[in-house]
Structure formats: C-alpha cells, structure tokens
Amino acid sequence: MGNGVGQSPSGAQWTIAADGHEAVVVEVGGGLRAYRHDGVDHLDGYAADELCPGGAGQVLAPWPNRIRDGAYTFGERSLQLDVSEPSRNNAIHGLVNWVSWHLVERADDSVTVGYDLPARPGYPWPLRLRTRWRVGADGLRAEHEVTNLAGEAAPVGFSVHPYLRLPKTAVAEASLRVPARTRVMVDSRLLPIGVTPVAGTEYDFTEPRPIGDAVLDVTFGDVVRDADGGSAVSLAAPDDAARLQVWADREFGWWQVFTGDTLSGERRRRSVAIEPMTCPPDAFRSGRDLIALAPGDTWRGAWGVRPGA
C-alpha cells in the first residue's frame, strides 16, 4: 500500500474488463468493490473513497460467519480468537478481510491477489491464500486457493460476501430462488441452535418467488446440487426484465442469504447478499462440514455471477 495522502481506504484498485464485463478488485481484503455488465451495476459495492460497508465483496476465511465467544477446540487444543463482534460476543468473518493482499499476477481480464496469513494466538496455523478474479463472456468468476503451511492439520472454512442487485428493482420485488431443503435456526446472537426443513414455510425458496416482506439473514443447507455437483441462487426482476445467477462449485454446500435489514442508511434492503459457504456458522465448534486441511495441502473452490442467467 502506498504512502500517499488521501489514499483509498480499500488500498490499490485493480480494474479488469472483457466482453462488456468490468470488475474492480481491491487490496484491502482482496475482495470485490464493483462488478458491472454493459454499464449496469450488478454488485452493490462501494466507492473508492469509502470504507467497505457491511462486508461488501469481502473474502471470509479461515471461517465464515460467526464463532460463539470466539472459543473452540481443534485436536487437543483449546483456542480463543479475538471477539470481533462485541455486541454479540462472537468472532466474525475470519482474519483476512481487513488486511492488505498483494498483487500476484495481472492481465486485462483477470487479476490474482494473495495473502500469507501468519500463525497467531487463536489460530496457530499459517495459510497461503490466493484468489483469481476474472471476467469474460460468461460473467464474473472467482477461483480461490487456501494452502496449509503448518506442519499439522488446520481447520478451514471459506465464504465470500457479495451483495447483488437488479436495475430498478427493490428487494421486495425481486424473485429469489435458493436450491436448499433446510435452514439453520439461530438464537439472538445469530448462532445455530438447530436445523429445520424449509418445505411449507416462509423460508421455502426452492421455487422462485418474490422476497416481499421477508427478513432474511438465513443459512440454507441440504443444497439441491446440479449435475456437476455445484448449485446456484438466482434473482429476477418482475416480468423477468432482468436476471442474475450466483453459482458455486461442489466445494460450497451452504448459502447465506441476507436482505440487508440491519444495514444503515441507503444500504438498508437495497440489495441481497448471496454468500456461498463451505460450512455453516460456528463450524469451528460443531465440526459441521469443517475442512481439516492436511499439512501442505491446498483447498480449491470457485464461484461466480452470471448476469441474464
């Protein structure tokens, strides 16, 4: 990061473009600040002079969502993470969303950024993270890698936090489809207390329907997978005037959908966060779909956005 006065809170900005698609990747967090197609913004991002709001476009690793009290055990160790959500006494959204990632490789249509996470109290396993962001005729694609540099297995979960929007379409008007049979029930701290089927409930979006007044900050599981093992969440405007699809490969078995009701100002219910996750909240404690990454091994996962799909 440079030493210039008045530099962007998100650090260096890397713009990639191809086939009418354009995205901006940022140094701080290695995430996505903007994505548009033919001049239409599909990502509810933020300005270059703005601090990233609400986790917009951030990479969440080595865990997504929340860990109760920041406390967990792995192997024979009892560990304590910093409590980064004091109001609920949770550790939230991992350790890499506010650090400076570095440029690894750049082309007109793609950029690869990386961060080497050092071992620390609470998470004593060094990791190497790499993300390749690319745009092309099929939309936006992100390819993620996490390599365990420790001499023992490390607990790993992964997610990303994009907010999606459709032109001239309010959240209530947007039609949502989430291919999932269950949802995670949570307590007042937004931590899991059980899993329940969505069939016949207000949380059943297995067939597309308008979001309406639904207030969603929901983890969906038991995903209905496509032939290739992946899955996709879709948003559509009334009369199908505009559509987009957020897809993820077989590595992501959970979807978090957030309608932005707790965001402040103009961002409240302006867009829908659609987050592919490898594991549900509090997986460091429950072990549910937690990746035990062996020494020297690399986890790889991919997801993306297809406008018009």
Image: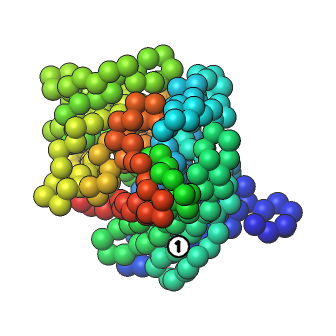
Residue 202 against residue 207 in the figure, above or below: above
**Residue found at x 20% / y 25%:** 197
Decide if residue 22 is in sight here. no
Residue 38, image x and y in percent?
40, 70
Residue 37, image x and y in percent?
40, 67
Left or right, 15 with respect to 136, comes to right
Among the 4 quarters of the image, the one containing residue 87? top right
In this view, the residue in front, 64 or 214, is 64
Residue at the extreme bottom of the image, as rendered: 107
Q: In the rendered view, how is the structure colored?
A: rainbow
In this view, the residue in front, 107 or 156, is 156
Among the 4 quarters of the image, the one containing residue 170? top left
**Residue found at x 31% / y 62%:** 306
Q: Which residue is mark 1?
A: 112
Amino acid at pointer 1: Thr
In this view, the residue in front, 183 or 95, is 95
Decide if residue 186 is in sight here. yes
Residue 202 against residue 165 in the figure, above or below: above
**Residue found at x 46% / y 30%:** 285
**Residue found at x 75% / y 66%:** 1
Among the 4 quarters of the image, the one containing residue 194? top left
Residue 41 against residue 87 in the figure, above or below: below
SS for tag 1?
strand
Disc 1 packing (10 Å; few <14; some 14–19; many ≥20): many
Placement of the C terminus among the 4 image quadrants: bottom left
Mark count: 1
Left or right, 107 with respect to 97, comes to left
